[in-house]
């Protein structure tokens, strides 16, 4: 009889293990940003459609987006888009065979996370401040 049977780990243990790996963090955030974009993009497209309908509706969209809550929603949407875009580029480059080793994957994930952090900080300055 086998003694190395699978063990059900608690959620806290799974999170603790995954937070130690930059590759896991990058992968999880890429999935979360994709889910976020799935729900946010239709609303942004509706705003775009409304803003292009007439000069009056454009002015309405401008006043709507001048509020603090709207700016935060727009920031979250753009931050998710930026992260998802950068992580997608990382995956495309890895499909070409770059950074497929364990160390290369970790270094690539760390570089992408740092680049995404700078991009998100720039988006925050642009949208919120």
Image: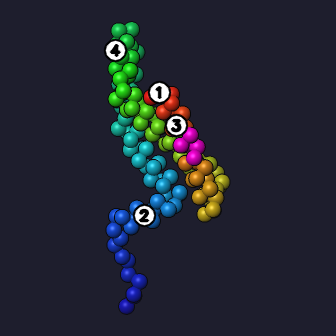
Sequence-first tag of 1 and 4: 4
Q: What residue is disc 2 on?
A: 16
Sequence-first tag of 2 and 3: 2
Sequence-first tag of 4 and 3: 4
Sort mark 2 into few (<14), some (14-19) or many (20+) by Cα contacts within 10 Å.
few
The secondary structure making up most of the magenta span is helix
Q: Is residue 117 magenta?
A: yes
Judge depth for marks 2 and 1 and give the one in front. 1
Sort mark 3 into few (<14), some (14-19) or many (20+) by Cα contacts within 10 Å.
few
The residue positioned farthest toward the bottom in the image shown? 1
Residue 120 x %, y %: 51, 38
Q: CB of mark 1 within 8 Å of CB of mark 4?
A: no
Residue 62 x %, y %: 39, 17
Mark 2 → mark 1, Cα distance in angstroms? 34 Å
Q: Is residue 35 above or below residue 51?
A: below
Q: Does the image show residue 71?
A: yes
Residue 127 x %, y %: 46, 28
Q: What residue is disc 3 on?
A: 121
Q: Is residue 4 above or below residue 46?
A: below
Give the left or right position of residue 48, taking residue 91 as reference. Answer: left
Circle 2 sits in a helix, a strand or a loop, which is it? helix
Circle 4 sits in a helix, a strand or a loop, which is it? helix
Q: What residue is disc 1 on?
A: 129
Mark 4 → mark 3, Cα distance in angstroms? 28 Å
Give the left or right position of residue 21, taking residue 34 as reference. Answer: right
Give, as a single range, the part of the protein colored magenta.
Answer: 114-118
Q: What residue is disc 4 on?
A: 60
- Rendered residue at 42%/44% (across/down): 34
């Amino acid at each position: 009889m086998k003694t190395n049977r699978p063990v059900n780990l608690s959620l806290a243990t799974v999170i603790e293990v995954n937070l130690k790996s930059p590759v896991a963090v990058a992968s999880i955030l890429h999935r979360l940003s994709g889910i976020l974009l799935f729900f946010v993009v239709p609303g942004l497209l509706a705003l775009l459609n409304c803003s292009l309908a007439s000069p009056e509706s454009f002015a309405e969209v401008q006043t709507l987006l001048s509020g603090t809550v709207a700016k935060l929603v727009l920031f979250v949407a753009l931050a998710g888009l930026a992260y998802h875009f950068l992580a997608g580029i990382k995956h495309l480059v890895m499909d070409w065979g770059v950074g497929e080793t364990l160390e290369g994957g970790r270094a690539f994930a760390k570089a992408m996370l740092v680049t995404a952090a700078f991009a998100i900080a720039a988006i925050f300055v642009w949208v919120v401040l």
